[in-house]
Amino acid sequence: MNRSVAGRIGAHVRWGRTPDRQAATEPARKAAADRWIREVRAEYPDLDEVTVQRLAESRRKAHMTRIARLPRKRRKAA
């Protein structure tokens, strides 16, 4: 069995035992959001909270857009 199949099986087993997926993934989602906030505050320590949140959200969206482009770039290179 290759690793990707084993990983898929493991994921299905894990989620098959988890009644509340949102609660199970909350710590990871919070950690991801905190990363962008830390980056913005390190660069701009004097900004108000609303602006920090807005900039952090834009950085997160830029990151996700870059990730979304990766498969397309790989297909073009192949």
Image (cartoon, helix red, strand yellow):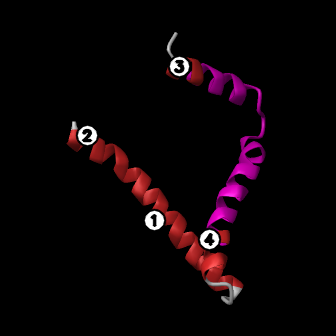
Q: Earlier in the sequence, mark 2 or mark 3?
A: 3
**Label 4 sits on residue:** 39
Q: Amino acid at mark 3?
A: Arg
How dense is the environment of label 2, judged by Cα within 10 Å: few (below 14), some, or many (20 and up)?
A: few
Q: Amino acid at mark 1?
A: Ala
Question: Under tag 1, what secondary structure?
Answer: helix
Asked if the residue under mark 1 is in contact with the one under mark 3, i.e. CB atoms within 8 Å, the reply is: no
Q: Which label lies toward us, 2 or 4?
A: 4
Q: What's the mark number on residue 75?
A: 2
Count the marks: how many?
A: 4
Asked if the residue under mark 3 is in contact with the one under mark 2, i.e. CB atoms within 8 Å, the reply is: no
Identity of the residue drawn at 35% across and 52% down = 69
Asked if the residue under mark 3 is in contact with the one under mark 4, i.e. CB atoms within 8 Å, the reply is: no
Q: Earlier in the sequence, mark 4 or mark 1?
A: 4
Q: CA distance from mark 2 to mark 4?
A: 32 Å
Q: What's the mark number on residue 76?
A: none
Q: CA distance from mark 3 to mark 1?
A: 30 Å
Q: CA distance from mark 4 to mark 3?
A: 34 Å
Q: Position of residue 1 (x, y in %)?
A: 52, 9
Magenta stretch: includes residue 7:
no
Magenta stretch: includes residue 14:
yes
**Label 3 sits on residue:** 3
Question: From which residue to which does the magenta span run?
Answer: 8-37
How dense is the environment of label 3, judged by Cα within 10 Å: few (below 14), some, or many (20 and up)?
A: few
Q: Amino acid at mark 4?
A: Glu
State the image quarter where residue 41 is shown. Answer: bottom right
